Image (cartoon, rainbow, N blue to C red):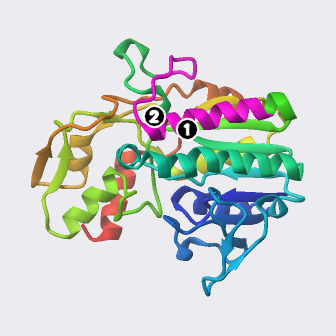
Amino acid sequence: MRTLVTGGAGFIGSNLVDQLIDDGHEVIIVDNLDTGKTANINPKAIFHQLDIGSPNLRFDTDGRTVIPYLQQLMVGVDVVYHLAALARVQPSIQEPLEYHRTNVTGTLNTLDAARIAGVKRFVFSSSSSVYGDVEEQDLPTSEDTQLNPMSPYALHKLQGEQYCKLYSDLYGIETVCLRYFNIYGERQLTEGAYCLVMGVFAQQILDGRPITINGDGKQVRDFTYVGDVVKANIQCGTIDRNWNGDVINIGNGGGYSVNQVADLLGANQRVYNPPVVEPRKTQADNSRAMELLNWKPTQDFADWVQDWKKELGI
């Protein structure tokens, strides 16, 4: 099968590319290397440095502009896995226009290129952030829970889902949207503006600094292993099913507080900052994934953290 992965040099995308190649599929990577890394690029994949927010342009290694169109890369592609995005809630609040360009315009550009090229199936990486702050009685959160985006990033992911459904209805392209819950695993960032809480804590510990926690640290997150996310993507792309804008939670179904994450990492020095805009608790109802994809989480979060600490030398 011929596949195209946007964001294929990033954390989740590169893990997906590796597994697709191991499974015998041909893979084209599209990534602008803003947050992706060249070290993550599988040498067996075909790589194109391309910004999906401006899909008519690509820059070669000398910085000169060349012009392949995004849809040209998709000719003959069976499945597009769309993971490219500017992630994280807080930076999106600071830079809503840049986030919109990548996360909404970029998704629309990618969808439309797939339509023009005649791609059959489109798997979209969405986010549990679309739910917002869920009432305790609505936990664990099912896909039918009322949506309440609390940030530009969350709203952009919801708009991406809506575009997927619209393209299925109007143009017949199969689309399915996976709502991820707090992904962790190999190749997660430990530095930079797009680093998630585990990576931030790990780097602060390695630097000999106290870790910084927003709010009281009692916020609970449902942490999901990247390998399990990869399996869900591949199952969506290969299963014999007619997708029509379906949405599916991909989450472990459990939860750890930020303070518990700090405990697991052995962080003794802590600084508590004022709270930020974020949900108090996330927890996935993953029964739909189990039913439709025969999917279930396989990795224990606490066990993985202990192995990761040894790898980092913490």
For disc 1, the marked residue is: 157
Q: Is residue 247 above or below residue 233?
A: above
- Residue 161 appears left or right of 265: right
Q: Quadrant of the N terminus?
A: bottom right
Disc 1 residue type (three-letter):
Lys
Circle 2 — which element? helix
Where residue 13 appears, as percent x and y from the top left, is 60, 58
Q: Is residue 238 above or below residue 60?
A: above
Which residue occupies 62% across, 38% down? 160
Estimate the x, y position of residue 28 in percent, counting from the top left: 75, 65
Task: Choose the circle earlier in sequence order: 1 or 2.
Answer: 2
Q: Are marks 1 and 2 in contact (CB under 8 Å)?
A: yes
Determine the residue positioned at 51% across, 60% down: 11
Can residue 34 be seen at all in this image of the molecule?
yes
Residue 228: tell me if it is visible: no
Q: Residue at x 61, y 87 (%)?
A: 62
**Magenta span includes 127:** no
Residue located at (85% from left, 52% from top): 78
Identity, as a three-letter code, of the amino acid under mark 2: Ser
Q: Which mark is residue 132?
A: none
Q: Which residues are magenta?
A: 141-167
